[in-house]
Amino acid sequence: MTARRTRIGIAAGVGVIAATAVRPFVPPTSIEGRVAGLLIAGGLALLTYRTVGMLTTDWGWVALFTGDTRSERVRWGSSLECRRARDSVLGVGATILKNTRESEVCSGQTWHMNTRGLLEMTWQDTCFLHWPMAPDELATHLPDGLSPATYKGDAWVGVVAFEMAGISPRGLPVSLSFPELNLRTYVDGPSGPGVLFFNLDADDKLGVSVARRLFRLPYYQADGQIRRTDAGVTFASTRTHDGVPSAAFDATYRRVGDSDTVEPGSLAAFLVENYRFYASGRRLLAGEINHDPWQLSDGKVDVRQNTLFQASDMANPNGPPIVHVADDIRVTAGRPEFA
C-alpha cells in the first residue's frame, strides 16, 4: 500500500507540474484550452504512475518495453544459462521475443516469460521465389559461425517480396508501411537453424534507419512500388542507398489454386517455416520472430528484372524458381542478441 501511495504521489506531482507548464500555451478561459491542459497533465501523470510501478518490479524493463505487466516473476537459478537469460531480460534494450509462453529449466528451477515482441507488423501479398544451390558454393558467402542448411542435399536461396504493413513498437499508436524485398538463405548456427539475409531493400528512410540500428540487418533504402490488379501483384524495387551496389527487381506474381497450411517436413516448410534470423556485424547476432503457421498456395511469376544476386556478388541461379504466394500474416519480432 505504501508503494502504491508513493506512485500516486509522484504521478500527481508530475501532473501538477505539467498543468502549470502548459498554462502559458493554452487559453485557460476556453473549453478547448482547459480540455487540452487536462489531457496533457492527466496523460503524463498516468504514464508516470505506470512507469514507476513497472520499474520497481522484477520485470520492470520488460514491461516498460512491451507494455506487458502480467508477466510472471522470475525464479533465477545460478547456472550460466540463467545468468544469460537474466541479463537479456533486465538489460536496457532487452531481447523481447516471442508472443507465446516460454519455459526453460535452470539448475532445477523453471523460469517463465509471457512477453510480447518488440515490434508488430503484418506481411501482405508475400511472394517466395526459391532456387537450389550447391552447399559448397553457398558456404563461400556465409559469415563465420554459420553453415548452409540443406534439404535432401541442396542448399537454397530465395527472393521474398511483400508489403510490410502496420509496423510499430508494441503499444504505440503510430506505424509504418512500405514495400520490402530481400535476398536470403537458410543456415545452421550456434542458436539453431535460421535465416540469413544478404540484403533487404525497403522504401522507407525511417524504417531502414531503425532496422539497421536496432536489428543490425543489412537494410538499404530503395524506391519500391506495389500494384494490385486482376492479373496479380506487380512488385518493383530499385535500390537508392548510397555507398552500396545498386540492385533492381521487377516482377508480377499471382496465386495458383487455394492456400493451405504448410506440411511439416516438406520442402515448403523448410523454406518458409523459419522463426530465427541471423545478422552479421562485429559479432554474430540472432533474433526471433513469431507468427502463426504460413498459409501458402502455389504461384506463377513473370520476372522482368532481378539483379539482387549480382549486388551480393553471387552468380545468378539456373532455371526457374519454385514459387509460393502466402496469405497475409501478423508477425512480432524481437531485437537480436549475441548468438
Image (spheres, grey):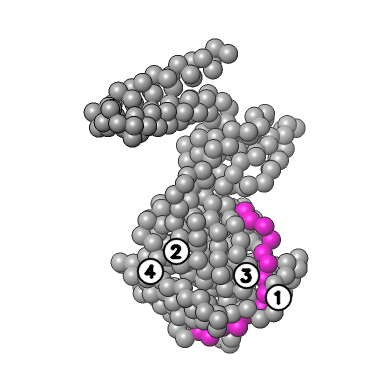
Tell me the magenta residue range. Answer: 289-303
Q: Is residue 316 above or below residue 13?
A: below
Instruction: Pinpoint residue 179: horizontal percent, then vertical percent.
Output: 46, 67
Q: How far apart are labels 1 and 3 at the CA level?
A: 10 Å
Q: Are marks 4 and 1 in contact (CB under 8 Å)?
A: no
Viewed as shown, does residue 7 lie left or right of 152? left
216 or 170, which is in the foreground? 170
Does the CB distance between marks 4 and 2 fall below 8 Å?
no
- The amino acid marked with disc number 3 is Ala
Q: Residue furthest front?
A: 30
Q: Residue furthest top?
A: 2
Q: Amino acid at mark 4?
A: Ala
The residue pinned by badge 1 equals: 258
Write down the residue under mark 3.
Answer: 326
Q: CA distance from mark 3 to mark 2?
A: 17 Å
Q: Closer to us: mark 1 or mark 3?
A: 1
* Numbered label attached to residue 222: 4
35 within the magenta span: no
Give the x, y percent position of residue 255.
Answer: 63, 78
Q: Residue at x 53, y 56 (%)?
A: 121
* Other residues around mark 3 within 10 Å, as few (<14) / some (14–19) / many (≥20): many
Q: Earlier in the sequence, mark 3 or mark 2?
A: 2
- Circle number at residue 242: none
Q: Which residue is mark 2?
A: 178
